[in-house]
Image (tube, grey):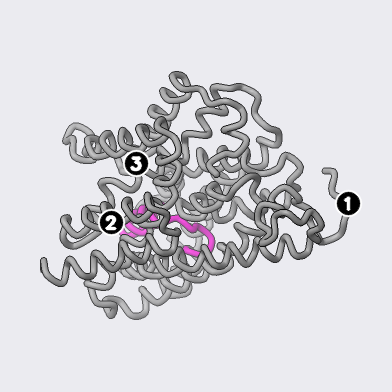
Amino acid sequence: MNIWLYILVSAAVSYLIRVTPLVLIRREIRSRTLRSFLYYVPYVTLAVMTFPAIVDATQSPLAGLLALIAGCLLSWFGGSLFQVAIVCCLVVLAAEWFLI
Amino acid sequence: MRYNNAGLFPFPVIGESFSPTPDKKVVTYLETNRTCFRAGIRDGIPIALGYFAVAFTLGIAARNAGFTAFQAFVESLTNNASAGEYAVFSLVAAGAGLWEVAIMTLVANARYLLMSCSLSQKLSPDTPLRHRMLIAFDVTDEIFGISIAVPGRLNPWYTYGAMAVAIPGWSVGTCLGVIMGNVLPLRLVSALSVGLYGMFIAIIVPPSRRSKIVGGLVLLSFALSYAAARWEALAGLSSGVKTIILTVVISLAAALLFPVKDEETEEAAS
């Protein structure tokens, strides 16, 4: 089958998933439970996606774990988004230098 | 829509919080949007670098599925989804039909539905339709993450700034992955791949320090996510599906047990 058809279908589905809530939910939601739910969603979903994925992303799981710990510590003590991301990368680079 | 000025979109609330001189109430809207756009570019650069590395490896999968460099470029440009695109490439490689691709894209990307719901509350209710439709184009884990972390309301121009660097990084990365294959050393790919998680960490840790509930939820999410990934009975579920189920269950339980006061949701994730 033509590959362009696959591209068209996947693009349309991806966009519809994202645009529907943004266009349909125009007002502030009043329900306290729903507001609380949406307040917690970002933290929970990002945390779920971070661990154990960070450990599986690196060649050595220990390097990923070290990056996680270093990133958490730096962020806890005020590191910026960019600093934390770079330090995580450097920790993996350094750790795998010795581990692999 | 209550917008009547042509071209310059006022977002005064954000404008003040983003202004380098927050005490000054006189901030022109042009400066405000421009400042937000620049801030978005600044925060988007690490995302673009991380995307480039991940997309590069994705390009290898695209090549295996029979995509040309240009087709892979367009796929990434229009989809902006790592897991979703990976699913598409593997399905096409396996000779699947269009329906299978549609359903798999839906499942792999369903978490963006939740993110868009959250994001809809982060925008001012006055935000015009065209902004909503443009932002929707690039609701990804990372762009969503930094957009929701902005103090106060979200000015769409902040997200556009991040998109302006992240989308080229993502689509060009995929394209080069098809062309150059395995040129990037594995060591470097491995190191760059955690950059994205570093950004997630930088978003979830500061609020965890401020709120014990959020901190507890983050630790609980780590633990349950680890259990779900390692528990063999769940091996048949994709990581995207697991993410959705865990997100809904944990957030819903938290919302019922610890409903937040309105002031907290007002400053949503600031």
Label 1: chain? B
Q: Answer left or right for B62 relative to B265.
A: left
Q: Answer left or right for A94 relative to A51.
A: left
Label 3: chain? A
Q: Which residues are magenta?
A: B76-95
C-alpha gap between disc 2 and disc 1? 49 Å
Q: Same subunit under labels 1 and 3? A: no
Amino acid bearing label 1: Asn
* Residue carrying label 1: B4
The label on residue A48 is 3
Within the magenta stretch, is there residue B87?
yes
**Furthest residue to the top?**
B257
Q: Position of residue B4 (x, y in %)?
A: 88, 51
The label on residue A39 is none
Amino acid bearing label 3: Val
Q: Position of residue B252 (x, y in %)?
A: 44, 25
C-alpha gap between disc 1 and disc 3? 42 Å
Q: Position of residue B258 (x, y in %)?
A: 46, 22
